[in-house]
Image: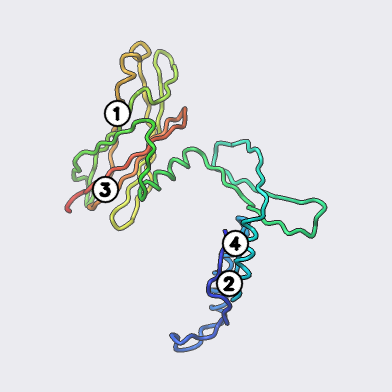
Amino acid sequence: FYTVGAGGLEAVGMSASEYRSNRNPVVSTLGADSFLGSLRFLAKGTGGMAIVKTNNFEEGFKRIERDLYSYYSLGYRLVQAGLDKVHRLKVTLPGHPDMNLRFRDTWVEKAVETRVQERVLAGLIHDLDENPMELEVRTGAATPATGEFWGVPVSLLFPIESVALLPEGEDYVGRVVLFIAARDADGKRSDTVREEHEIRIPADSYEQVRKLRFRVDTSLLMTNGTFRVSIGLMDQVTRQASYQKSRLTVGSP
């Protein structure tokens, strides 16, 4: 990130016309340091540059331009852990102690489940056109549950053959993970619900049913309002995922 303190130079603690009296210099200094510190932190952690406490932005922008036209792109082979893990990065240039190196100092490896959950949350705002498992979502009529809450039945359907089934005894067994989140018209969102579901098919009937659609039933507990619901379904074996969305109006309009 290349961050810019657009306020330029500032005499901390002095009053502007909208203030009746001078601001407390200690409070003002802490506020300014906190603001500038966040800009410096973002720039340093990503190998960028912070242009702060200056009115000479032209020189700062020229430095950014030089960065964008002259840099080294380095890579390394990562042995993935398959988990959420922070990797620390360090770059050295032996024999050139006078050189100033800037580089991203961390890289976050995310587990597949974490990435699927993040995309489900993204689906609360953006349309996701990823549906390799041919996932279909059906919602039923809301019924009163308790207090101001309503129960909304949700069914997910997908072809059995879209899920990897492994032999287990006399059956073929597959497992999927379901993620659901909701966002109301005011922008408030729910926690992400995670559910595991098993698909068990007798081996001798697999060929007859593999073209059929498997159904997973669940229920959402919701208050009155209009909601956008984002849904993700992940195959635990292949780690393939599909995404769908639905709009619900619950209770009184």
Q: Residue drawn at (32%, 51%), measured in percent from left and top?
A: 183
Q: Residue drawn at (59%, 61%), measured in percent from left and top?
A: 41
Report helix, strand or loop for mark 2. Answer: helix
Q: Which residue is mark 1?
A: 215
Residue most toward the front?
69
Q: Residues within 10 Å of mark 4 (few under 14, many from 20)?
A: some
Q: Nearer the viewer, mark 4 or mark 3?
A: 4
Q: Nearer the viewer, mark 3 or mark 1?
A: 1
Q: Are marks 3 and 1 in contact (CB under 8 Å)?
A: no
Residue type at numbered disc 4: Phe
Residue type at numbered disc 2: Asp
Residue most toward the left?
252
The disc at residue 33 is 2
Q: Are marks 4 and 1 in contact (CB under 8 Å)?
A: no
Occupied quadrant, residue 99: bottom right
In whole angstroms, how far apart are the C-alphas of marks 4 and 3? 40 Å
Residue most toward the right?
95
The disc at residue 238 is none
Q: Which residue is mark 3?
A: 222
Q: Nearer the viewer, mark 4 or mark 1?
A: 4
In whole angstroms, how far apart are the C-alphas of marks 4 and 1? 48 Å
In whole angstroms, how far apart are the C-alphas of marks 1 and 2? 56 Å
Q: Is residue 1 above or below residue 131?
A: below
In whole angstroms, how far apart are the C-alphas of marks 4 and 2? 12 Å
User: Is 56 displayed left or right of 21 in the figure?
Assistant: right
Report helix, strand or loop for mark 4. Answer: helix
Occupied quadrant, residue 65: bottom right
Q: Residue drawn at (37%, 40%), measured in percent from left and top?
A: 129
Q: Position of residue 18 (x, y in %)?
A: 43, 85
Report helix, strand or loop for mark 3. Answer: strand
Report helix, strand or loop for mark 1. Answer: strand
Q: Which residue is mark 4?
A: 41
